[in-house]
Amino acid sequence: MTPQAWAQLAGVLVGFLLSQFATLAVWLLAERRERQLVRLLVSLEIDQNLSLVQEFWHNVALPPDPPFTDEEDEDDADSDFARSPPPPPPPVVESEAARLSRRAADIPLPPFRERAFESQLGALPKALTAEEIKGVWRVYEELAQIRTVHSWLLDVSADGDGERPFPSASAPIRAQGLTSATFTAKKYGVLFD
């Protein structure tokens, strides 16, 4: 082979290697971008769901309204209208737990979103570490628990007697086709850095 043929062969090899390197670099950058976007989608959805839970709980935990007073009628003592009958006796004061459970059943539960989580489920192993996947799974499990407990509260408030047992903390909770592993009250830290 002539030196010119070796130069051509070397040029082809170098060109091939450079094109393969460029393809690999583009693929690695695309993989990195996909991982970042999956993390972003799931973290935004979790943040939105946690905001809905906070807003729901804020509405449940609002202090009770002050009792209605009939001071306006006392100011109109000179009016020609007959006085209304005396107000009914004040209602029995309910316990804080009863008030919170009644309000939690009365206030509609906001619809939690799971679209990003479900659509990116196949990409999660590439985008998240094992601990992050466990944390994300726990968050969505807890959202299911909130739905289940809210459903239970609705059932109990509809029954009127309040004698239905609360779902066990160690047994699966089932409501409206939804089954969860256990009911926990864990607090979660930051899922994503």
Image: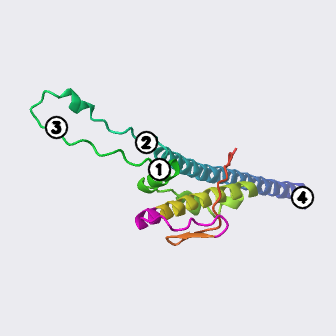
First in sequence, mark 1 or 4: give its number. 4
Residue type marked 2: Pro
Front residue of 141/73: it is 73
Q: Quadrant of the C terminus?
A: top right
First in sequence, mark 2 or 1: give its number. 2
Q: Which residues are magenta?
A: 154-171
Front tag of 3 and 1? 3
In the visual, does 40 lie left or right of 160? right
First in sequence, mark 2 or 4: give its number. 4
First in sequence, mark 3 or 2: give its number. 2
* Percent coordinates x, y for residue 43 in the rendering: 61, 49
Indicate whether 114 appears above or below 188. Answer: below
Q: Which residue is mark 4?
A: 2
Query: Can residue 40 be seen here?
Result: yes
Front residue of 131/55: it is 55
Circle number at residue 83: 3
Circles 2 and 1 in contact, beta carbons < 8 Å? yes
Q: Which residue is mark 2?
A: 64
Residue count near mark 2 (Cα–Cα under 10 Å), binned few <14, some 14–19, many ≥20: few
| Magenta stretch holds residue 57 | no
Q: Secondary structure at mark 1?
A: helix
Residue reaching furthest to the bottom: 177
Residue type marked 3: Arg
Q: Secondary structure at mark 3?
A: loop
Q: Which residue is mark 1?
A: 99
